[in-house]
Amino acid sequence: MSRSVYTARMPIVRHDKTIVDCDVHQAYRSLSDIYPYLSRHWIEYTRDSGFSKLPYSAYPKVVNGGERLDARPPDGGPAGSDLALMRRQLLDQYGIECAILTGNFQNASLLPNADFAAAYCRAVNDWTIDCWLERDGRLRGSLTLPLQDIDASVKEVRRIGEDPRIVQVLLSVGSNVPYGNRQFDPLWRACEELGLRVALHTGGTGVMYPPTAVGWPSYYIEWHTNLSQVFQAQLVSLVCEGTFEKFGRLGVALLEGGFTWLPHVMWRLDKNWRGLRREVPWLKRPPSEYIRDHVRLTTQPIEEPARPESLLDLIHAVDAEGMLMYASDYPHWDFDAPVAVFPTGNGELKRRIASTNALDFYGL
Amino acid sequence: MSRSVYTARMPIVRHDKTIVDCDVHQAYRSLSDIYPYLSRHWIEYTRDSGFSKLPYSAYPKVVNGGERLDARPPDGGPAGSDLALMRRQLLDQYGIECAILTGNFQNASLLPNADFAAAYCRAVNDWTIDCWLERDGRLRGSLTLPLQDIDASVKEVRRIGEDPRIVQVLLSVGSNVPYGNRQFDPLWRACEELGLRVALHTGGTGVMYPPTAVGWPSYYIEWHTNLSQVFQAQLVSLVCEGTFEKFGRLGVALLEGGFTWLPHVMWRLDKNWRGLRREVPWLKRPPSEYIRDHVRLTTQPIEEPARPESLLDLIHAVDAEGMLMYASDYPHWDFDAPVAVFPTGNGELKRRIASTNALDFYGL
């Protein structure tokens, strides 16, 4: 199926209190919601194979699958599957002018069958456009890709990446090869050409491979806390492989990985670059500069120090004022309402995090 | 071989400028140095099997194997294998009152043959006592253990852990199971009983298993930068499994992992504990308190922010003044001389890092 006609996107209303929410999870009520976008072959495949859901983390330790119970539609279906409820609980309640839909489909990249994964991703992407982006002008979309097959992923990006309401591709932060590896270059090239950002979101870890470099921890609290290490490893790879030299207009958003590890990664990498830069001669600048220019991080789940001002000090210590973007993670259990983020922040920083950093990064 | 008579340890000279160096690598000149401590069977085994060195990292990217060339004895042998040179270049040159020897043997835990590993560790430990600790009263030692076999490790701890000059066991930070896993409890129990600290040191990563949770990065600079994630994962495991509740007098030193990730781990773990503590009901206090009470981190390779005062702000933000201990990493390429560490630090903090934190932690 090719899509060549797109609805023009609605402009985002900009004012002093504009809020852009960079991580909102839409869901389908049941797999049959995407049947209209699957061929008969793949529909039968899902039935014959008993496929009901994507591979998911081996740490099923949060009650209700991590969903806010109050976000489940009263007439059934998982949290995030009802636009009217999302409007009421999120968009209208907090005056959110723009929400970037991030789905929950990135583990499609872990499906053993690459052709099914490609068909599934196409279906989910078309369903997102038709059933979400078409229905509310405040919404923007992320593309799900079948990373088992880079060619197929590039093809999918080219198929619908020109839709002006699609702002990024969204991949699991977990992978078996770090994303700086050259095998991903064709995908970054396509994203750069189409002006799409690359989002790495929690997912893919603790499913088929251990979620840490030292194996399987025992508890969900560990899995959740250790997630940030995976973001760090991907960032180190993207920087050191020269991805941002090869693709000078590429932008990467790290979703749900926290950000207070930035001082460590930026300082240690800069120091190591000074000592070891002959190993990566394509890097023309200190690594921290690539990170500051090309990478954005969302706030949820925001770290909460004992003294709130410590967070501001840390942001200023690495000049990260332009790098952070608000995210609620609606409708998940660890949802951050806008008021929860930087209650003590100064006005200008708060405005950047609430909207302008995201407006600039995504060109909204 | 059992050792029941120990030379009393020399007291550490304490004054305002005392320096304790918590990471100094002694080496043997060649394997035959430890033959006196190996049985004929194992000597023949090393000859028959062609064993020459321990498994080592797949990232052999630093010239001279990471050694300071000037630290190689003029008459041959690797850096760190000559006590006279170590005295001249380190102990005497910087007025170091106490150096904790950390060897370079922790990858013995990766040897496929557990019995050979146990014999090798015994030999290295005896050699360390005879050829180093006996020869300079400023030196303290770390035990190398064959972690393939916890029982054998406990046995080795009990064999010579009472030597008052042995201050800790030293393990690779890399492992296939996180160290909080209950399989390690007998070892922590033995360490606690004998008053030994547990040091986790760079090693074991990027040898047999990928050094990150997303596989193998391409370059040494990445491996080196990503190391800190492994320390984070081990720390999260030790805290969440309740190791410090089970062993209230256990102390863990993290060597070479950096420390500016502490705010991230402490804040995120505390927040997650508030939300998820029913999963780990044995934790009686916020995770950051266990970390602050039970964990110490060495300074080398110290992170170097653009603005040196950022480092002090960060230390104060997590009340880590009592957690940091100076280390030089002599004789490796990224050696930090005492003057390189906290040149702008205030007097009291500098004194704690230079000596008092280590004197207290190790009971020197």
Image (spheres, coloured by chain):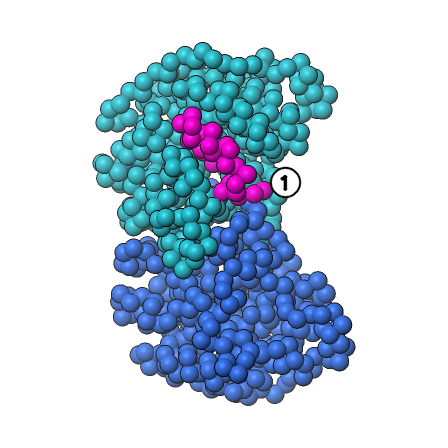
Chain colours: A blue, B cyan
Quarter containing the C terminus of chain B: top left
Residue A254 in sight in this render:
no
Residue at position x 40%, y 41% in the image? B245
Residue at position x 63%, y 81% in the image? A33
Residue B46's spot in the image, x, y percent? Answer: 68, 21
Residue A108's spot in the image, x, y percent? Answer: 63, 67
Residue at position x 34%, y 59% in the image? A304
Residue A214's spot in the image, x, y percent? Answer: 55, 45
Tell me which chain the residue with mark 1 is part of: B
Residue at position x 31%, y 30% in the image? B360
Q: Nearer the viewer, residue B267 or B345?
A: B267
Quarter of the view holding residue A153: bottom right
Question: Is residue A304 shown above or below B196?
Answer: below
Q: Nearer the viewer, residue B83 or A73?
A: A73
- How many residues crowd around disc 1 within 10 Å: few (fewer than 14), some, or many (20 or more)? some
Query: Would you name the residue on which mark 1 appears?
Result: B208
Magenta-colored stretch includes residue B185: yes
Magenta-colored stretch includes residue B210: no
| Residue extent of the magenta highlight | B176-201
Question: Is residue B78 shown above or below A4?
Answer: above
Quarter containing the N terminus of chain B: top right
Residue B189's spot in the image, x, y percent? Answer: 46, 32
